[in-house]
Image (cartoon, rainbow, N blue to C red):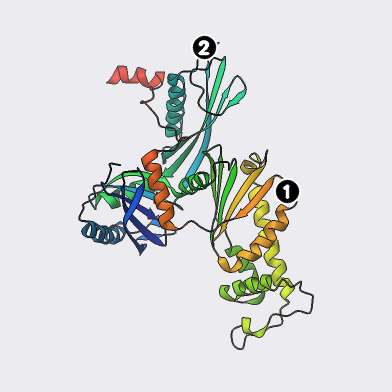
């Protein structure tokens, strides 16, 4: 970004389009000069369903910003959170036989692995590559070991990919508005980087967000984005189970769980749900302990699925790890806290911290600064990878 030249960032999710325009000031920091939030149109369940509707909605907001700041945008950076994405970890190696690790060695591994991912994931497109792990002669090396002598070097990378159809739809929507998409950035990466910037000694940690219909699990270690996964259920399973028993609506269930955590009551078998929780004329004798037990059982089951039944995540639980947990439904936040603390007190390798969701503007500013400075563990291919021997033979025959 050039100093004082406006740049446009747009976060896309199924509820809102968040537009932030800003400049890179003299101190090389992103400064917001205009912002707009509108309801998302043409998108449903994190999939575009109407290109024209989405394009027209986005066009109106961009036009408002351009008129206010007297500037016409040609480029845009897109931030996505809940689109389908894929996380792949791969390692490559180089036999050194006593020679130095060179930049060319690392570039070769990076380009070779990038080519392998691209050829095997033709339905998806790479949006991020991170340096995950460097090992020289069996010893983990914190930074890239360029210039060090050794016999065997291995390098692990993490690739994040987005479905081609989603990516093509994004490009089409903005091309219709005469905008070039500079980059598509995963919001999970931005939020993890934000936590790292706020706490330089953070070490390895999980960033977990529990929403109504999904759970996003992200693992960071040594400033690198190592692993990410989306589970297609959230707090809705708690409400659905309680609804089956007592036919209460979600607001009443949330109120009960919130109220009774604050009261800190241990229910006995005779404690019944008060009449005001029911719709008029629908009162039934339902034990409070039953509802409380259902909620706790579902929360404990959710934690168990995340940390004990997930093979990928179990492999990361080797050392002391922090968990930063965000729960979107504030009505049941405290009830969740009680159950999570109880559950994690059994596991001394995990420290849990409950944090609020980052404000949209704050999150976009952080991502804008990432685009200015880059990220120290993000890997950038330096050259085009060489084609395989078979490909080169065919090209020589038919070109």
**Residue drawn at the location 59% of the way across and 54% of the way down:** 325
Secondary structure beneath disc 2? loop
42 relative to 239 in the view: left or right? left
Q: Position of residue 286 (x, y in %)?
A: 71, 79
278 relative to 230 in the view: left or right? right
Q: Which residue is mark 2?
A: 99
Q: Position of residue 284 (x, y in %)?
A: 68, 83
For the residue pair 92 and 205, the one nearer the viewer reads as 205
Q: Position of residue 119 (x, y in %)?
A: 42, 32
Q: Does residue 323 lie above or below 317 as drawn?
A: below
Q: CA distance from mark 1 to mark 2?
A: 44 Å
Q: Does residue 266 lie above or below 197 as drawn?
A: below
Most distant residue in the front direction:
27
Most distant residue in the bottom direction:
281
For the residue pair 118 and 274, the one nearer the viewer reads as 274
- In the picture, the quarter occupied by the C terminus is top left
Q: Which residue is mark 1?
A: 347
Report which quarter residue 53 is drawn in: bottom left
Q: Is residue 169 visible?
A: no
Secondary structure beneath disc 1? loop
Report which quarter residue 205 is drawn in: top right
**Residue drawn at the location 39% of the way across and 55% of the way down:** 12
For the residue pair 83 and 19, the one nearer the viewer reads as 19
Q: Is residue 198 visible?
A: yes
Sequence-wise, which precedes: disc 1 or disc 2? Answer: 2
**Residue drawn at the location 67% of the way across and 57% of the way down:** 340
């Amino acid at each position: 970004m050039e100093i004082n030249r406006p740049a446009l960032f747009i976060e896309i999710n199924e509820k809102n389009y968040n537009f932030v325009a800003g400049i890179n000031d003299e101190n090389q920091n992103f400064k917001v000069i205009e912002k707009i939030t509108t309801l998302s149109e043409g998108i449903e369940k994190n999939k575009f369903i109407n290109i024209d509707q989405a394009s027209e909605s986005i066009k109106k907001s961009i036009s408002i910003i351009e008129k206010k700041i007297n500037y016409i945008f040609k480029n845009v950076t897109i931030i996505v959170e809940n689109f389908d994405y894929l996380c792949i970890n791969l390692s490559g190696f180089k036999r050194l036989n006593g020679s130095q690790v060179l930049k060319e060695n690392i570039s070769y591994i990076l380009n070779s692995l990038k080519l392998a991912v691209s050829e095997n994931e033709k339905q998806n497109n790479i949006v991020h590559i991170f340096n995950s792990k460097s090992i020289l002669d069996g010893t983990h090396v914190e930074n890239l070991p360029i210039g060090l002598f050794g016999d065997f070097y291995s390098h692990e990378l993490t690739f994040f990919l987005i479905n081609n159809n989603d990516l093509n739809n994004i490009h089409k929507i903005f091309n219709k508005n005469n905008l070039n998409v500079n980059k598509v950035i995963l919001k999970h990466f931005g939020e993890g980087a934000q936590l790292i910037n706020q706490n330089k000694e953070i070490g390895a940690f999980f960033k977990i967000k529990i929403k109504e219909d999904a759970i996003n699990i992200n693992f960071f270690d040594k400033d690198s984005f190592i692993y990410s996964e989306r589970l297609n259920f959230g707090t809705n399973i708690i409400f659905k189970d309680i609804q089956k028993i007592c036919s209460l609506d979600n607001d009443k269930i949330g109120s009960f769980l919130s109220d009774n955590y604050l009261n800190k009551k241990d229910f006995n078998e005779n404690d019944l749900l008060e009449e005001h929780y029911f719709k008029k004329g629908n009162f039934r004798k339902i034990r409070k302990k039953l509802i409380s037990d259902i909620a706790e059982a579902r929360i404990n089951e959710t934690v168990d699925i995340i940390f004990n039944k997930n093979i990928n995540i179990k492999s990361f639980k080797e050392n002391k790890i922090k968990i930063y947990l965000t729960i979107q439904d504030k009505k049941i936040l405290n009830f969740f806290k009680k159950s999570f603390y109880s559950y994690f007190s059994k596991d001394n390798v995990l420290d849990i911290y409950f944090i609020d969701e980052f404000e949209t503007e704050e999150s976009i500013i952080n991502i804008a600064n990432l685009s200015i400075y880059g990220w120290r563990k993000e890997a950038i291919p330096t050259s085009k990878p060489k084609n395989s021997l078979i490909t080169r033979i065919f090209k020589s025959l038919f070109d």
